[in-house]
Image (cartoon, rainbow, N blue to C red):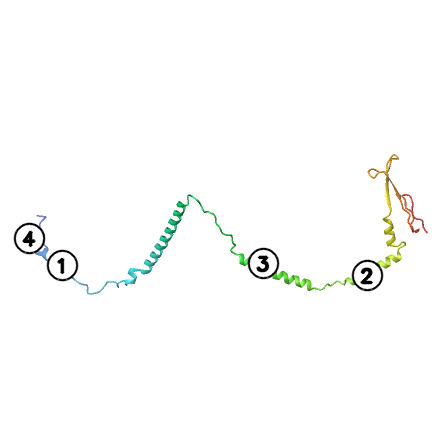
């Protein structure tokens, strides 16, 4: 009895009421499924150029073409390696080049121009020293020195080079220059009489 249909309102026949209620429910569901909205709540349609995304397809094609080209190059290199009987070409035939070579060259040229300018200024500069006055003063000093000296400077220096020094060996042996304890000085006589002979114990006499 508890499994039988229980209508909302009191009825005389439950089976007929169940059938009628079921028909009403099915008709209601059909109406709901076929009904149209009074308000259009759908979004705007996406444009075709956005749906297809032609730029994305173009980029994909370019990427695939680049990959295909790289693959063909790699395949050709591998084929060359296979047919070359294992010979390797791993030497890099290129010269090293600095990235800032132009900048350094410009700096060198600038420094060279500056050095040339400094050199030209140094060459064109006149000396501040009066050299001729120094030479005249030196000649005057030499004349005064020659006037106050007792013996002339020139001949004394010339005749002093004629002195010979001999070394006497110990024990009366022959003179040797290797070992000596006493020194004897001999003065060669020249034609000038104003030069006195010199020796180790002699001294000048006062005139």
Which residue is under mark 3? 108
Which residue is under mark 2? 137
Which residue is under mark 1? 30
Q: Give the distance between the C-alpha atoms of the residues marked 4 and 2, in whole angstroms.
A: 158 Å
Give neighbour class at mark 4: few <14, some 14-19, many 20+ (Cα, 10 Å).
some
Place residue 127 in its image quadrant. Answer: bottom right
- Residue ID at (32%, 58%): 57
Q: Residue furthest left?
A: 12
Q: Give the distance between the C-alpha atoms of the residues marked 2 and 3, in whole angstroms.
A: 48 Å
Give neighbour class at mark 1: few <14, some 14-19, many 20+ (Cα, 10 Å).
few
Residue 170 position within the rendered picture, expressed as x and y whole percent measured from the top left: 86, 35
Give neighbour class at mark 2: few <14, some 14-19, many 20+ (Cα, 10 Å).
few
Q: Earlier in the sequence, mark 4 or mark 3?
A: 4
Which residue is under mark 4? 15
Residue 173 position within the rendered picture, expressed as x and y whole percent measured from the top left: 87, 35
Tell me the SS state at disc 3. Answer: helix
Tell me the SS state at disc 2. Answer: helix
Residue 22 position within the rendered picture, expressed as x and y whole percent measured from the top left: 10, 55
């Amino acid at each position: 009895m508890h499994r039988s249909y229980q209508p909302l309102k009191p009825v005389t026949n439950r089976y007929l009421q169940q059938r009628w209620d079921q028909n009403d429910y099915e008709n209601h569901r059909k109406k709901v499924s076929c009904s149209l909205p009074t308000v259009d709540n759908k979004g705007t349609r996406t444009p075709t150029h956005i749906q297809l995304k032609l730029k994305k397809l173009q980029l994909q094609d370019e990427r695939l073409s680049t990959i295909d080209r790289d693959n063909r190059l790699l395949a050709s290199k591998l084929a060359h390696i296979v047919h070359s009987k294992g010979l390797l070409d791993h030497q890099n035939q290129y010269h090293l080049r600095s990235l800032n070579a132009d900048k350094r060259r410009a700096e060198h040229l600038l420094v060279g121009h500056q050095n040339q300018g400094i050199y030209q200024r140094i060459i064109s500069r006149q000396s501040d020293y009066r050299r001729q006055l120094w030479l005249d003063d030196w000649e005057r000093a030499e004349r005064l020195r020659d006037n106050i000296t007792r013996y002339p400077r020139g001949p004394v220096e010339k005749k002093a080079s004629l002195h010979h020094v001999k070394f006497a060996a110990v024990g009366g042996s022959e003179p040797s220059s290797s070992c000596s304890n006493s020194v004897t000085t001999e003065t060669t006589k020249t034609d000038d009489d104003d030069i006195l002979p010199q020796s180790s114990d002699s001294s000048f006499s006062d005139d």
